[in-house]
Amino acid sequence: MSENLIPDGFTDTPQLPGTPWCVHDPRRPLPPVVAPAPADQPYAPPSDAEVLFDGRDLSGWTGRDGKAAWKLGDGFMEVVPKTGDIWTKRDLGDGHYHIEWSAPAVIEGRSQGRGNSGVFILRQYEVQVLDNYQNPTYADGTAGAIYGQFPPLVNACRAPGEWNTYDIYWFGPRFEGDRLVSPARITVVFNNIPVQICRELMGPTQYRKIASYRPHPPTGPLQLQDHNNPVRYRNIWYRPL
Ligand code: MG
């Protein structure tokens, strides 16, 4: 960018620590322009998002035997119990994950047996999906929990059959050789309510065990869980950060 396009700024100001820039530096690169979602469709993907599921096809997804065997409906996909988890063909990493889900309108089961699914970042770290509308379960297995580690700050679940939104801000763990340098950090916003804020995770999700880290790459697929309940998903997108 040519300097003379920038109308103002200062070069006689102090240098900002840790940067080559001075305060109000006109030479500092401008943030890229992104078109946000239209005001009347606040969850539509911003212009720079990678759409992972637009409600029309599962071509970006795979699963057991190389096939995503879930059912496509009118603008959504639905878990077909016993067909297994599905995951993106693409590897994803640090970033913003937007996911919408709805629990079956016909209530069946209780506690962990009702509307259970899950969003696994890097196929390893589960943000719990569960129909917790007037359906209590153990705290660290509640919808919006980091399963087995951190309950959500509040239970923001909508009624069965209604759509819920997750906006997940993920910064994965970093390793040097076998050593953990920094743990994964996650923020989860559930129906516009923050339920996990800059949470430092103990490790990949475990069932009935304490989590711990072992080195792994910074990217991997996004996985959705088949937990034997016909949970629906729609409008899934990702922005690297
Ligand atoms: Mg689950």
Image: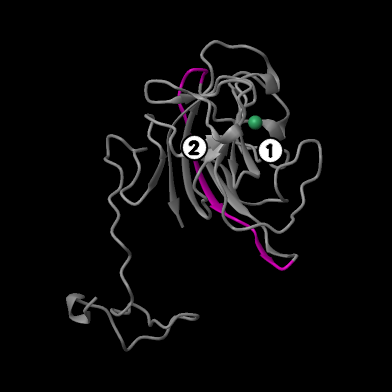
Q: Contact, CB < 8 Å: mark 2 with mark 1?
A: no
Numbered disc 1: secondary structure: loop
Q: Is residue 174 magenta?
A: yes
Residues drawn in magenta: 159-177
Please tell me which residue lies in front, 76 or 114: 76
Q: Amino acid at mark 1?
A: Tyr
Q: Is residue 109 left or right of residue 4?
A: right
The answer to whether the residue bearing label 1 lies less than 8 angstroms from the nearest atom of ligand 1 is yes
Position in image of residue 155 (x %, y %): 59, 30
Above-or-below relation of 38 to 106: below
Q: Residue at x 51, y 19 (%)?
A: 159
Position in image of residue 219 (x %, y %): 56, 54
Q: Closer to the observer: label 2 or label 1?
A: 2
Which of the four quarters of the rendered structure image does ligand 1 lie in? Answer: top right
Q: Which mark is residue 102?
A: none
Q: Residue at x 64, y 22 (%)?
A: 82
Above-or-below relation of 155 to 121: above
Please tell me which residue lies in front, 185 or 124: 124
Read off the residue under disc 2: 61
Query: How packed is label 2: few (under 14 Cα within 10 Å), some, or many (20 or more)?
Result: many
Numbered disc 2: secondary structure: strand
Please tell me which residue lies in front, 189 or 88: 88
Position in image of residue 31 (x %, y %): 33, 65
Q: Amino acid at mark 2?
A: Trp
* Colour scheme: one colour
Read off the residue under disc 1: 147
